[in-house]
Image (spheres, grey):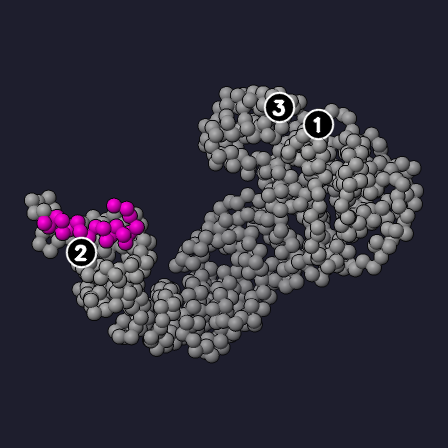
Amino acid sequence: MSTHLLGIRHHGPGSARAVAARLAELAPDVVLIEGPPEADRLVDFAADEALRPPVALLAYAADEVARAAFWPFAVFSPEWQALRYATGAGIPVRFCDLPAAHQFAAETEPKAPQADPLAELAAAGGYDDPERWWDDFVESRRGGESPFEVIAEAMTALREDERPPDPHEQQREAYMRTVLRKTRKEGFERIAVVCGAWHVPALADPLPPATADRSVLKGLPKRKVVCTWVPWTHGRLATATGYGAGVRSPGWYHHLFTITGDVTTRWLTAVAGVLRDEDLPVSTAHVIEAVRLADTLAALRGRASAGLAEVDAATRAVLCGGDDVRADLVTRRLVVGEALGEVPESVPQAPLAADLTATARRLRLPRTPVARELDLDLRTPGGLDRSRLLHRLLVLDIRWGEPEISSIRGKGTFRETWTLCWEPGFEVDLVAAAAHGTTVAAAASAVVRETVAEAPLLADITAAVENCLLADLGDALPEVLAALDTRAAADADVAHLMAALPPLARATRYGDVRGTETTQLHAVADRILARVCTGLPPAVHGADEAAAARFCELVDEVHTAADLLGQAARERWFAALTRLVERSALPPLLAGRVARLLHDADLLGSAEVEVRLGRVLTAGVAPSDGAAYVEGFFAGGALLLVHDERMLRVVDTWLGDIPPAVFPEVLPLLRRTFGAFAGPEKRAIGERAATLSGRIAPSARATDDLGDLERGESVLPVFATLLGAAR
């Protein structure tokens, strides 16, 4: 009986190549691999060519999906190569790490920082970068000699000076030894154990007494665990994601493992392809020079062949011309990469996940890890079905697609624009969402019902109505509308009613676009608008600055909503605004905003607006109130100051009359208004302000009357301050 310990580094091409070669040489009759034993029933899937790495084992607690963990594998992962060897050779293969059932049941406790064994070995070899040391001595190896004996010796030496062991690590190694003993008792003669290099000394003979390990494992709590295979990505294998066993360059490691000759040349050729895809000028001569530079750097550094450091330097210097943006592009696309694995349909899945897989396939929505834009035409069955699926997933908080807000909240457009990007973590979200239903539609309907039942605000219910129509959750809509009618009738807060109306108005338009009956919804929206029009004046009476700002936002939203609800709603809303603008106790900010809305609708003429501006921008009114009125009126309205000289003159005169001691107090309010204008608008206002004169026309600037020129230019410092421009 013989036991062979193959100490590896997770996700290392050198380790993977060495494991594959050593297993073929040893021809073991059983293979043990560091990993969750709950996945033993899934190992046979590794023989299926449809299971294409990168993939991961997903384990989660049956009673608490949030307690979940992934064990990822790439094609260059030693564990994956061990799985493929064993299933291909038809020999038993088992996972031997501490069961997830124990790990998920254990109380989470802070762990003491553990020394990095690779860092210590690298330091002993004169390296300040453990990644570079491992790459030199293991990952970039091309010879046939086995590294496992040397690794075991080095780890044994390191563990002699080990700090007090971590209890969790003690439990893991005790369980590994327990599995090893059990395997030996079953009569296997040639046992291969593939585990992290750090654990090799703990599994070497002579093993400690079994009683000692049983005492370590005695009484460990357990939870029921479910395990399955899920797709993974190279990006999720990167250290930058926070993955503890991650590597800095998954794409490079994949290249090292899969390419057997001309490694540097083929890599830099691929780099050139990435840059050319972005229409960047890269020639064959660039690639040749980059290869020469990488090989020269390797020779100068005493390396047998160019590694990632050398090809990165050559890429940046030659192919990217020293440009950091181009180099970062290569890092994202190639050095890290975003390859997404595949899992066959035969792998057990939660019903909800299986429904999504089947639906996405039917709708031709591939799950890709690279963000891509998707334009949908809702007049076509395919576009409408894709939109419904993506909206249902949003209800489940699975954000595979992020909608462009303007396309979703527009005035009944037949088009939607989405950005799609699949994240492996969505697999856990799908499992969690399965508690609500076995299909995406059923689960989304259940979530909407729960939201309505627990919604503290009327706006939450109207948002649920909107979701029902966007996601086509017709079975839940009657219940949601009934709750909406009841809650709206009981809610006397005007701000709540105003916040609730826009989603309803958009929903009525969605119904038109999507062919959904919305008569009842329109009736509810009309009733809410009527209550808003009646209750708004007393609600804003004497409002403070913060409340006035909030009501300004709500008035803008209701204004848009009334436009969506039709002509009768618009007339009712404008009648309410006309009454409101005449109230003397209206906060200046809101008064200015209402006046602007009426002016834009041709219900308040320019002459009347000039009178109102002149009235509020006088010495008898506090400058802060005048500034608030200006902010409310001119926010988003720079063209009024460009094209209406009378309004510009009123503002200019008021600015000139503000006492110097008071001006700094109103400046922040004014800069908030004028600073939001676009650059060309600011320049146009400045040019018009420069022509202001009480006695001459703009065309008469070039005269000998220096006094008028000086008078016109005197306002420029004020406008330069307002617009944030240096003179």
Q: CA distance from mark 1 to mark 2?
A: 78 Å
- Residue 143 position (above or below residue 47): above
On screen, residue 99 versus residue 291, left or right, reads: right
Q: Which residues are magenta?
A: 707-727
Q: Position of residue 662 (x, y in %)?
A: 26, 62
Q: CA distance from mark 3 to mark 2?
A: 72 Å
Number of other residues with Cα within 10 Å of mark 3, as a class: few under 14, some 14 to 19, many 20 or more: few
Amino acid at circle 3: Arg
Nearer to us of marks 3 and 2 is: 3
Number of other residues with Cα within 10 Å of mark 1, as a class: few under 14, some 14 to 19, many 20 or more: many
The circle drawn on residue 301 is: 3
Q: Identify the residue shown where x is 58% and y is 35%.
A: 335
Circle 2 residue: 645
Residue 721 is inside the magenta segment: yes
Q: Position of residue 47 (x, y in %)?
A: 75, 40
Q: CA distance from mark 3 to mark 1?
A: 16 Å
Circle 1 residue: 141
